[in-house]
Amino acid sequence: MTKLEQSPAGNSPRVGIVGGNGRMGKWFTRFFTQVGLDVTVSDVDTEITPADIARKCDIIILSLPMEIFPKVVKEIGMLVPEESLLTDFCSLKERQVKCMLENSKCSVVGTHPLFGPGEDSIEGRRVAICPGRGKRWLSWWEGFFQHHGARTTIFSADEHDRSMAWVQALNHFILLCLGKALEEDGIDLNQVFELATPSFERQLHIVARLCFQDPELYATIQMSNPYTDTAIRTFSKYAQMLKDILNRRDRAAFVSMFREVQELGPYLLEHFEKEEKNKQR
């Protein structure tokens, strides 16, 4: 048995997933099982309860809607032994990590798989990890994901949520507005596709994929992140500024704004070049 197959206590860790019959819960049940870990699942339709998971497992994963997350943590947090790990798969982390810390004495780590249940493998997928309590489980958890091909990054919970306001909340905001604008205009979408540039076609493809997503989850992501308002307010300020420039037909102001955005180019291109090199390794 290798160190990555052992828990910090030296045994093969027993994994318990509360909410294990949800889409992400099922995905990770398969993943953990495939890599040789013993997995127990609790959900609304199982005889095994969240309390059973808390008492019996070494790694307790909460794969739950954020609306019921605090209630479940308060019910089972103190049942988790101090030598075990309590973690979650929520899309936000600041309130979630704080909730787990306040209602338990065990090791706590926030985990955000930055991919959906449609992926075939964890290979190359990003996983954000937010420290809570305890270094041994934190180190093991990060090493476990890296060993199986995931790309992990450690963030504080507030850093995570501030970035997710841009990555998720503002991104979803733009996609919803684009979809509604196309719908209201009534333009022939077949003609749009025939004239679409590659970049716009990619945007339309992302809008199309919204039909597979849970609108309740998206609403929670938009409305529960404390940094969403700042991101959308900043975006809206420049959207209005650009609209005013276009209304005035102020070519010089447009070129000035465009050149300011171009200054981001070298940094972004450097990032994408590094990403491509990492994929080729």
Image (cartoon, grey):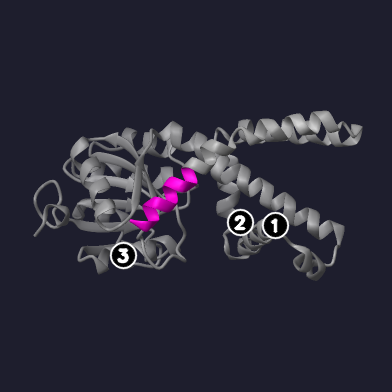
| Residue located beneath label 1 in the image | 200
Amino acid on which disc 2 is placed = Pro
Q: Tag 1's secondary structure?
A: helix
- Location of residue 239 (image quadrant): top right
* Mark 3 / mark 2, whichever is N-terminal: 3
User: Considering only order in the chain, which callout, 1 or 3, is on the residue closer to the N terminus?
Assistant: 3
In the rendering, which numbered label is found on residue 215?
A: 2
Q: Amino acid at mark 1?
A: Phe
Count all numbered tags in the image, as a single digit: 3
**Disc 3 element:** helix
Residue 262 is left or right of residue 108, and the answer is right
Q: CA distance from mark 1 to mark 2?
A: 23 Å
Mark nearer the N terminus (1 vs 2):
1
Cα separation between marks 3 and 1: 34 Å
Q: Residues within 10 Å of mark 3 (few under 14, many from 20)?
A: some
**Which contiguous range is marked in magenta?**
271-281
SS label for mark 2: helix
Instruction: Give x and y (percent) for residue 70.
Output: 42, 42
The residue nearer to you, when weighing 185 against 224, is 185
Residue 31's label in the rendered image is: 3
Q: Residue at x 33, y 56 (%)?
A: 281
In the picture provided, is 47 more to the left or to the right than 256?
left
Classify mark 1: residues with Cα within 10 Å, few (<14), some (14-19) or many (20+): few
| Residue drawn at 33 percent across, 54 percent down | 150
Identify the image quadrant of residue 166.
Answer: top right
